[in-house]
Amino acid sequence: MNETPQEPSTDAPVPHSDMGWLQSMIAGSRQRNFSTAQSRVEVVEPPLPLDPEILLQTAIILTGDTTQEGILVQGVAVAWEEIIRWLAQDPEFLFKIDWRKLEEIIAGAYQRDGWSEVILTPRSGDSGRDIIATRTDVGAIRFYDQVKAFNPGHLVTADDVRAMAGVLYRDQNVSKAIVTTTSRFAPGVFDEWKSFTPTRLELKEGAQLLEWLQQIRKQR
């Protein structure tokens, strides 16, 4: 792969109203994988889709109203869980997901994890924030997450992290800033910000991102 950020997909998404075939396929697959033995029912994971890129053309998250900061995320669609399952088997698929779909996947993860309010910011003019996640069940906590969908050789630079730190300083109502990347951070970045991590600033590399997504998927 070249050492450039991933480009947005030009494929037209499949409207949410047309997802019935996908949901029926997955539901049928799950039903066929129930087996009974000695009055005990064992649930077996359904087989993975034949073409995971089809999932990326469908709705990944369920959205609600639009606020001044972006679109409210109300839930995750069937495709969200199937994409995360696929990533468990093929981590390299992470680099085939375009930047906007990756933002949707991560926003869906926050919502699935029980955050009170999750906002996906606009494609442009996001003021350095791709996702805004708020919790009110354990006090008032507000996170900014900036997502860097980079190919493996394209590292997140110290200047990238400094820019996010500037957003953290600018907005006094935010508890923590996170820079999430599919790739890794450049040498020296962790040392530069070690006094801020992990309480005020979190630097999440691709391996950590994959592990985090799997942990959330397995929550029931």
Image (cartoon, rainbow, N blue to C red):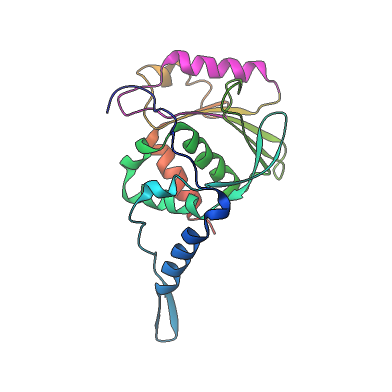
Judge whether residue 143 is colored magenta: no
As rendered, which of 139 and 150 lies closer to the eye?
150
Tell me: residue 178, above or below residue 207: above
Q: Residue at x 47, y 37 (%)?
A: 102
Across and down, in percent, residue 112 comes to 57, 49
Tell me: residue 174, above or below residue 134: above
Tell me: residue 173, above or below residue 158: below
Across and down, in percent, residue 54 comes to 40, 49
Q: Which quarter shows the C terminus?
A: bottom right
Tell me: residue 104, above or below residue 45: above
Q: Which quarter shows the N terminus?
A: top left
Q: Pick out the residue farthest to the left.
A: 1
Left or right: residue 61 compared with residue 183: right
Left or right: residue 60 compared with residue 120: left
Please provide the residue range marked out in magenta.
Answer: 145-172
Q: Residue at x 36, y 56 (%)?
A: 49
Across and down, in percent, residue 160 comes to 47, 17
Left or right: residue 169 compared with residue 185: right
Tell me which corner region of the image, top left, top right, bottom left or bottom right, holds residue 8: top left
As rendered, which of 192 and 157 lies closer to the eye?
157
**Across the whole image, how many numbered discs are drawn on residues?**
0
Across and down, in percent, residue 20 comes to 52, 60
As rendered, which of 211 and 80 lies closer to the eye?
80
